[in-house]
Image (spheres, grey):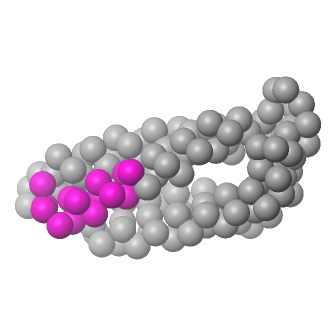
C-alpha cells in the first residue's frame, strides 16, 4: 500500500504540475486584474511546495520504515489538502474577483487532480495507520 500511495502521489503531482504550468503560461500572478484575487500567489506557491515536502517525507518513510516520517507526511498532506480545497472552492465559484489564467483551467485536469489527490490522502492515511505495526 505504501508504494501505491507513492505512485498515486506522483500522478497527483503531475496533474497539479499541468495546472501550475497553465496558470504560469497564462500570466500567473502578473495577470491578476484586481487587487483581491481568487488565487493569491502565496496560496498557489504554498500548495505545491508543501506537497513536494510531504512527498519527500513519504520517500524518507519508504527508505527508513520509520513511522514518524509517515505521520509527518500525512500531517503535511492534510495541510496540502486544505489548501487544495481552498483553491478548488475559489475556482468552482467562478473567481468573481479574478479575471486571470485560472479561469481557463480545463475541468478534466482539475477533476483528475482532485480525485487522485483524495486517493493519495486516503492511501497515505491507511499506510501510515498500518506503519506502526511493521
Quick one: quadrant of the C terminus?
A: bottom left
Q: Nearer the viewer, residue 55 or 122?
A: 55
Whether residue 1 is visible here, answered yes or no, is yes
125 versus 35 height, above or below: below
Q: Position of residue 69 (x, y in %)?
A: 21, 50
Q: Position of residue 13 (x, y in %)?
A: 52, 64
The residue shown at (59%, 45%) is 45
* Residue at x-position 38% and y-position 51%: 53
Q: Is residue 99 left or right of residue 65?
A: right
* Horizontal side of residue 97 vs 125, given as left or right: right
> Is residue 27 highlighted in magenta?
no
> Is 95 situated left or right of 120 in this image?
right
Q: Residue furthest top?
A: 35
Which quarter shows the N terminus? bottom left
The residue drawn where x is 16% and y is 56% is 131
Q: Main secondary structure of the magenta part?
A: helix
Q: Is residue 85 at least partly visible in the picture?
A: no
Q: Up-down: is 85 above or below 24?
A: above
- Which quarter of the picture shows residue 107? bottom right
Provide residue 12's location: percent of width, then percent of height: 53, 64
Q: Magenta segment, which residues?
A: 53-66
Amino acid at each position: 500500500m505504501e508504494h501505491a500511495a507513492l505512485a498515486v502521489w506522483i500522478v497527483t503531482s503531475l496533474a497539479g504540475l499541468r495546472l501550475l504550468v497553465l496558470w504560469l503560461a497564462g500570466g500567473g500572478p502578473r495577470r491578476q486584474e484586481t487587487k483581491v484575487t481568487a488565487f493569491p500567489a502565496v496560496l498557489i506557491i504554498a500548495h505545491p511546495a508543501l506537497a513536494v515536502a510531504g512527498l519527500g517525507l513519504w520517500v524518507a518513510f519508504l527508505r527508513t520504515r520509520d513511522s514518524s516520517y509517515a505521520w509527518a507526511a500525512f500531517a503535511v498532506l492534510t495541510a496540502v489538502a486544505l489548501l487544495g480545497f481552498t483553491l478548488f472552492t475559489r475556482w468552482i465559484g467562478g473567481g468573481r474577483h479574478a479575471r486571470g489564467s485560472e479561469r481557463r483551467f480545463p475541468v478534466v485536469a482539475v477533476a483528475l487532480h482532485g480525485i487522485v489527490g483524495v486517493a493519495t490522502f486516503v492511501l497515505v492515511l491507511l499506510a501510515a495507520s498500518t506503519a506502526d505495526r511493521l
